[in-house]
Image (cartoon, rainbow, N blue to C red):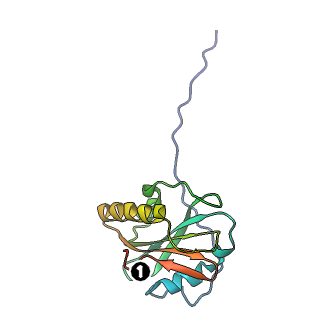
Amino acid sequence: MARTRKHTYLKEIEIKYKIKKINDKVIGKKVTDATIIAELFADLQNETKEKFLAINLDTKNKILCFEVVAIGSVRAIYLRPMEVFRTSIIVNATSVILVHNHPSGEPQPSPEDVNFTMRCQRIADDLGVELYDHIIIGLDSYYSFAREGVL
């Protein structure tokens, strides 16, 4: 009788970059305020579902890359705070800007948004990464946690 050999598998992580066409006046420049990010990701105002992004910055606050961390429903998104920093660690980012949209068009943060941001702040502190801002994109407007003094 022939023996069947069992195989054991190990997952390998592979990082791939996709290219997003953007306004080139931002690339290579220091991110100094929320307006730059709000303009760069203004297309989120047209999304029918919530999308959550992490934008990773280098030591000079220039954009290294961004990741769509999660996509939710029209009202909510399920996301664990530690998932926000997955790419930040890999690319050795020194700071992170969180961005998500509100399909309703109203950028005011919900209590859940504020709670999630504070949880992310604690994790960022533990990782030695600066949580530079959390921006909520609405219809032709945005909310910046940093500008409002929450971060």
Up/down of 41 relative to 3, above or below: below
Which residue is more in the foreground, 124 or 72?
72
Nearer to the camera, 61 or 114: 114
Is 123 left or right of 97, judged from the image as shown?
left
Q: Amino acid at mark 1?
A: Glu
Q: Which residue is mark 1?
A: 148
The local secondary structure at tag 1 comes to loop
Q: Residue at x 38, y 60 (%)?
A: 119
Q: What residue do we see at 59% from left, 74% from top?
A: 106
- Circle 1 Cα neighbour tier, 10 Å, few/some/many (<14 / 14–19 / ≥20): few
In which quadrant of the rendered view does residue 19 lie?
bottom right
Q: Position of residue 139 (x, y in %)?
A: 64, 78
Q: Is residue 79 visible?
A: yes
So how many labels did they put on this image? 1
Question: Residue 143: image x %, image y %?
Answer: 50, 78
> Image point 59% across, 78% down: which residue?
41
> Can residue 87 be seen in this snapshot?
no
Q: Which part of the image, by quadrant, shows the N terminus?
A: top right
In percent of width and height, residue 104 lies at 64, 70
Q: In terms of depth relative to the viewer, which is nearer, 106 or 69?
A: 106
